[in-house]
Image: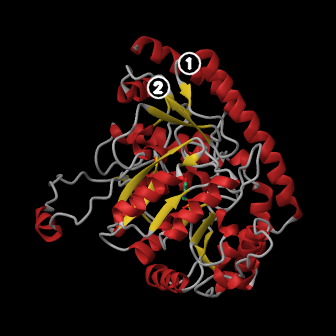
Amino acid sequence: MGNDSSNRIVEELRRWIAGALPGARLPSTRELVARHAASPVTVQAALRTLTAQGLIDSRPGVGTFVRAVRTARPLDFDWQTAALRVPHTRIPTGPAAMRPAPPDAIALHAGYPDGELLPERLVRAALTRAARGSTAISRAPVAGLPDLQAWFAAEITTAVPVGITPPTANDVIVLPGSQSGLSSVFRALVGSDHALLVESPSYWGAFLAAAQAGVRVVPVPSGPTGPDPDDLARAFQETGARAFYAQPNYANPTGAQWSRERARRILDVVRANGAFLIEDDWAHDFGIITDPLPVAGLDDAGHVVYLRTLTKSVSPAIRIAAVIARGPARERIIADRGAASMYVSGVLQAAALDVVTQPGWHTHLRGLRQQLRARRDLLIDSMTEHAPTAYLTGVPSGGLNLWYRLPDASDLSAFVRECEERGVLVAPGTEWFPAESAGHFIRLNYSGVNPGAFPEAARIMGGVLRRAV
Ligand SMILES: Cc1ncc(COP(=O)(O)O)c(C=O)c1O
């Protein structure tokens, strides 16, 4: 409410400033309070915004004035061209999934769940408690808070069969989100100029992290049931790679989940090649009709390096994840983490641990399952009815995304642009391919705001497709 009226005052004053002379005096705070029926705090917030935008100057005790216009001089950064030279690797910027959406758009392009799918009450209470505790004013250990390490380790234990030694708290390194964990793991275990096998398609953020680490990605085709173990074995032999990055559960973007049999065969290939499986369990909390089965549970020889994030299921503002690694690989990763960021905010770790150890967390996850199922099915039904030429590659058993293939005759960039012009944001599939894409794909995320608009979004996509073909 306060925010809305402050924005309204900012807009009105901007219009007034546009027609005023430099140095003109703004009405006093008291006049603005009366004119906008707002509180002095709201008026002050609006004035701070305009000051930050460089439109006004406040002189305490004198008044507030329209800022004198200075002659704009083009800034000269030419020297940086010479200083920076050509980058060793070019890291693409601005992935489609991270674009902000205009307020009235139907946003199916993004990756982070809407607030109504988050345990908001638990998060707020946890942050309040964490702010009162000792972690708010102390440095956390480099590998993380011991109780949080223990929680992450215990989460894997249910997937560990008899005869395998489960990971312990000591094998866990807490991370500020799994994106930076991917960077660390690629730097520490693969290294610059070495090959990393990746599923194709796979998460664009992993390709960015690989590019940042100077790692060469080599695609291995992956369908609705995961990669073919024979393709993987061939890729290991051809490239001499010693690591494979994969998402065995509810892969982003395809939603694929490996069967237990497939997981065992892939792990056998990884073992036979003396390699690592870097398992990204990003959607562990988003099972819809199955439960996730981490491959890490099948390994106690340090072949699987396992990443699990809470960013999407607890809160994007509590950016906490973990990597579980055993043997010298763990030492390499922790050394990289120390160099990159020393330690992770203890107050955020304490808040994350608080949320996931409340009885309400499991109640929340059960409700979330129902909501994701309803959203997934509504979007699929809407697409089937209104955009029947878009082909759903597989109904995901979990995760947040649908992966559609458009007719070969369509123009993907034109489709995405025309949908956007009509208020629907979709992510073009190109970014999920490490090389050329194998067709025209789009990723639709069903966890965003306003699922009630899915039928309308599908109608718009169907209309654009009909016109295009
Ligand atoms: C497959 C996958 N891995 C990792 C991440 C990054 O997670 P975090 O938010 O913990 O950095 C994402 C985010 O979209 C993802 O989709």
- The residue shown at (52%, 86%) is 328
Q: Is mark 1 within 8 Å of ligand 1?
A: no
Q: Closer to the camera: disc 2 or disc 1?
A: 2
Find the distance from the CA under tag 2 to the CA under tag 1: 10 Å
Q: Is residue 388 left or right of residue 95?
A: right
Q: How many numbered dots are placed on residues in this image?
A: 2
Q: Nearer the viewer, residue 77 or 274?
A: 274
Q: Nearer the viewer, residue 361 or 241?
A: 241
Q: Which residue is mark 1?
A: 387
| Residue 258 spot, x, y in % from top left | 64, 51
Identify the element where label 2 is drawn.
loop
| Residue 435 spot, x, y in % from top left | 34, 47
- The residue shown at (36%, 51%) is 55
Q: Nearer the viewer, residue 230 or 111?
A: 230
Quadrant location, the C terminus? top left
- N-term mark: 2 or 1: 1
Q: Is residue 174 above or below residue 216?
A: below
Q: Which mark is residue 406?
A: 2
| Residue 455 spot, x, y in % from top left | 64, 22
Residue kind at label 1, given as amino acid type: Ala
Whether residue 467 is visible:
yes
Q: Is residue 120 left or right of residue 421?
A: right
| Residue 175 spot, x, y in % from top left | 57, 73
Identify the element where label 1 is drawn.
loop
